[in-house]
Image (spheres, rainbow, N blue to C red):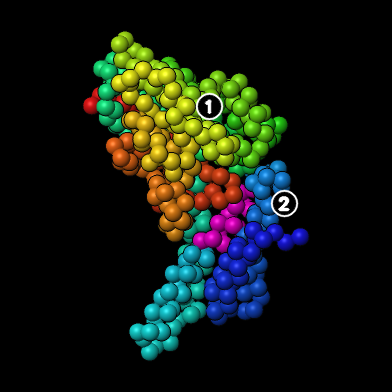
Amino acid sequence: MFNPFMLVPCLICLYTVLSMAIPLKVPALVKLLLALLTVSGLAKLFLLRSTPSGFDILELPRNIALLLSAMFSFMIAAAIICLAKDVIFVLWKIFSRAKFPAHHASLTVLVLAVITTIYGIYAGTRVPDVVRHDVKIPGLGRELDGLKVAMLVDIHTGSVNRRPFVQEVVNRTNALSPDVILIPGDFVDGHVARRKYDLEPLSGLRAKFGVLAVTGNHEYYYDLAGWLETIAGFGVKWLDNESVIITSGNSRLVIAGVPDPTGGNHDTPRALEGLPENVPVILMDHQPRFARENAKHSIALQVSGHTHGGQFPVVYELTRRFNNGFVRGWYDVDGMRLYVSPGTSQWDGFPMRVFDPSEISLFTLHAE
């Protein structure tokens, strides 16, 4: 039975075929093959929607999963570039009497879509670089000045991001000698039986004050209880509307965490209950869209992920609208600092990045 969810992608695919393939001055067979290539981009979505969660891609060899992702990414990239081409076409008709070079314009779309897809898939699946941030924390004691906080988020271990990727992320993180490691959600795409082996290198993360985490929305699409137990077994401490206090000498710092709202248990005031006064707070909240509410609770710094940095120039704008204006980088929210990471990796469904590199974040805290 046709899923209504597929109507919009099918229309996007049809538009792309009509705008890119039909105007080309090439043999009909070539147009047909190009149309089939574009339509094949829908295969990934049909596989996703055929599963109970709508997100659990069938277990596939990595190369096949990557190929399906590339075909879908090509369709999206081509559609966006076609839209730009057709805007130019309208302006051409308004301001020029010359014939619009439809063939060359469509050929340009095809070439740019191929280049964008190849680059975007590479950028979306590579092991991320370390990005360093110096952060002033009001009220931070001198003994904690220089504290190094590493953050991984949106690891999305799945059919594409497997054990070697996770192991290299762990190696690069440990090489930073962080004092504490934060992971605000979206560890995995898949069930424990399939993905535990791939995520297992997380057990090798090392930090003086431990590895702290909260759930992301993707943890709720699979076996939540199983993953909570499994990841805790890797030495990761879950903060479920809870906080811990890091102490060095007379200096203290609170790390608080709230679970993703997908589980219906997102409660920032509860996470901050009973804390001593005048101790700075860092809050992990997977989605940045609650920043303005969180800022009401005297939080020094909120760290989030979820948005993947927008991934692609046009997608960036859509992401901004769905996340209360927060997509990537630093924001000052009513006196609270907010950092939205572009993510350590990408969800298998659309693993493409353009002008949006992933990162392992390293915050060095300084007293203000």
Residue appearing at x 48%, y 59% in the figure: 115
> Where is residue 305 shown, x and y percent of the image?
46, 40
Question: Which residue corresponds to the image point at 60% horizontal and 63% vertical from the top-left?
Answer: 8
**169 or 57, nearer to the observer:** 57
Q: Quadrant of the N terminus?
A: bottom right
Q: Position of residue 9 (x, y in %)?
A: 60, 62
Q: Is residue 238 above or below residue 107?
A: above
Tell me the residue that label 1 is attached to.
240
> Which quadrant, please, contains the C terminus?
top left
- Identify the element where label 2 is drawn: loop
Magenta: predominant secondary structure element? Answer: helix
Location of mark 2 (residue):
50
Is residue 176 something one can see in this rendering? no
What is the CA distance from the residue labelled 2 to the residue labelled 1?
A: 32 Å
Q: Is residue 365 left or right of residue 35?
A: left
Amino acid marked by disc 1: Asp
Q: Amino acid at mark 2?
A: Ser
